[in-house]
Image (cartoon, helix red, strand yellow):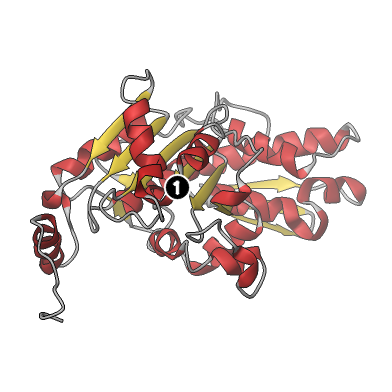
């Protein structure tokens, strides 16, 4: 589908496109459409539903410009989020039968890479996907290679593309002892990048590198060290906490209470790989115990049969689970 709009001149045009076309960049990256302003015309092309959403956002930007109340960046992001609701025939839009929403199902997750869809490979993964979609808070435990992180990121990307969330927040305990990020070189993103690599690797499997970088630059995707979550409330956001077995009880409580309106939260971890100095302080194990009977919270346990990496990984996990130990004589 392709739509073309006429743009006003001068200040009103800037109010619609944003300085240096920043508004168009945000719309392009948030909705995954092509949007180009040339010679006082704006052209939008892409998936029918997403083009209709983008057109609705442009109409509202235009109305704000005509009223001499140009949108702020935050208002634009909220408008994009709300654009998935009640899309109807409007001035500037051709008659259409486009649905007012894009349902997400656990059977096949639509991500940004063309032709790429994410599907569960095991019964446990299928149950995990269904659980995330049906609940606002999911705690998932399981051994390495079961897709705990990958599947959570897939749901987040699918929800972002469908307009069901406005942002993705990726959170991880950055370092073991108090998250002393200051000892690492670079800015905050560079400091935490090595710790968030598994989350970023999953993202790169679902959208191209340039798109990931632009989403991060525009705060559509935010990388957050756990220590920087205090005091925040995240609305309209898919929030993923990875390696949660390395949170303390206090950190876990702090994290869980960041959940805002219209948001989902997924907590993943492997309780056999706790790196805390005192494993008894593990926030994930404590949360599993405390929240077991709390309405609205659900828990998923993936098992060895859900391991989808190299066959050898499953056998290694089984060997360690059976209590195999290295002794000095075996090293």
Residue 325: give x, y in percent of width and height: 13, 66
Residue 43: give x, y in percent of width and height: 65, 53
Rate crowding at label 1 as few (under 14), some (14 to 19) or many (20 or more) other CA atoms within 10 Å.
Answer: many
**Residue 109 picture quarter:** top left
Q: Which residue is drawn at 44% across and 55% down?
A: 112
What residue is pinned by disc 1? 247
Q: Which residue is drawn at 60% across and 61% down?
A: 214
Is residue 172 toward the left or the right of residue 21 in the image? left
Is residue 184 toward the left or the right of residue 147 in the image? right
**Residue 192 picture quarter:** bottom right
Q: Quadrant of the C terminus?
A: bottom left
Q: Vertical placement of 88 versus 170: above or below?
A: above
Q: Which residue is drawn at 37% across and 63% down?
A: 205
Element type at marker 1? Answer: loop
Mark count? 1
Residue 310: give x, y in percent of width and height: 15, 67
**Is residue 253 visible in this depiction of the protein?**
yes
Between 273 and 65, the one nearer to me in the picture: 273
Residue 70: give x, y in percent of width and height: 84, 39
Q: Vertical placement of 136 versus 218: above or below?
A: above
**Is residue 106 visible in this depiction of the protein?**
no
Q: Vertical placement of 75 versus 110: above or below?
A: above
Q: Which residue is drawn at 16% across and 47% down?
A: 303
Residue that lies at the very extreme toward the front in this rendered image: 328
Between 180 and 11, the one nearer to me in the picture: 180
């Amino acid at each position: 589908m392709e739509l073309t709009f006429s743009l006003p001149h001068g200040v009103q045009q800037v109010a619609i496109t944003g300085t240096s076309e920043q508004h168009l960049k945000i719309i392009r990256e948030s909705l995954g459409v092509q949007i180009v302003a040339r010679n006082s015309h704006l052209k939008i092309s892409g998936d029918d539903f997403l083009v209709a959403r983008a057109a609705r956002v442009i109409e509202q930007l235009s109305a704000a410009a005509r009223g001499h109340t140009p949108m702020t960046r935050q208002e634009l992001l909220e408008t994009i989020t709300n654009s998935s609701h009640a899309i109807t025939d409007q001035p500037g839009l051709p008659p259409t039968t486009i649905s007012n929403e894009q349902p997400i199902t656990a059977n096949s997750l639509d991500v940004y890479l063309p032709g790429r869809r994410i599907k569960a490979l095991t019964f446990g993964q299928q149950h995990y996907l269904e659980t995330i979609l049906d609940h606002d808070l999911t705690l998932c435990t399981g051994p390495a290679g079961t897709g705990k992180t990958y599947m959570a990121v897939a749901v987040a990307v699918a929800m972002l593309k469908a307009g069901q969330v406005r942002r993705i927040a990726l959170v991880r305990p950055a370092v073991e002892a108090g998250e002393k990020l200051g000892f690492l070189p670079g800015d905050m993103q560079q400091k935490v990048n090595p710790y968030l690599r598994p989350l970023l690797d999953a993202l790169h499997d679902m959208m191209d590198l340039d798109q990931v970088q632009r989403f991060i630059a525009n705060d559509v995707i935010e990388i957050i060290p756990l220590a920087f979550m205090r005091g925040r409330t995240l609305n309209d956001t898919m929030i993923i906490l990875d390696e949660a077995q390395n949170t303390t009880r206090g950190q876990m409580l702090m994290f869980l209470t960041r959940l805002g309106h219209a948001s989902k939260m997924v907590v993943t971890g492997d309780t056999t790989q706790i790196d805390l100095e005192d494993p008894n302080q593990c926030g994930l194990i404590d949360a599993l115990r405390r929240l077991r009977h709390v309405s609205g919270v659900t828990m998923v346990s993936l098992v060895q049969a859900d391991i989808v990496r190299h066959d050898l990984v499953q056998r290694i996990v089984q060997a360690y689970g059976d209590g195999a130990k290295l002794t000095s004589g075996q090293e």
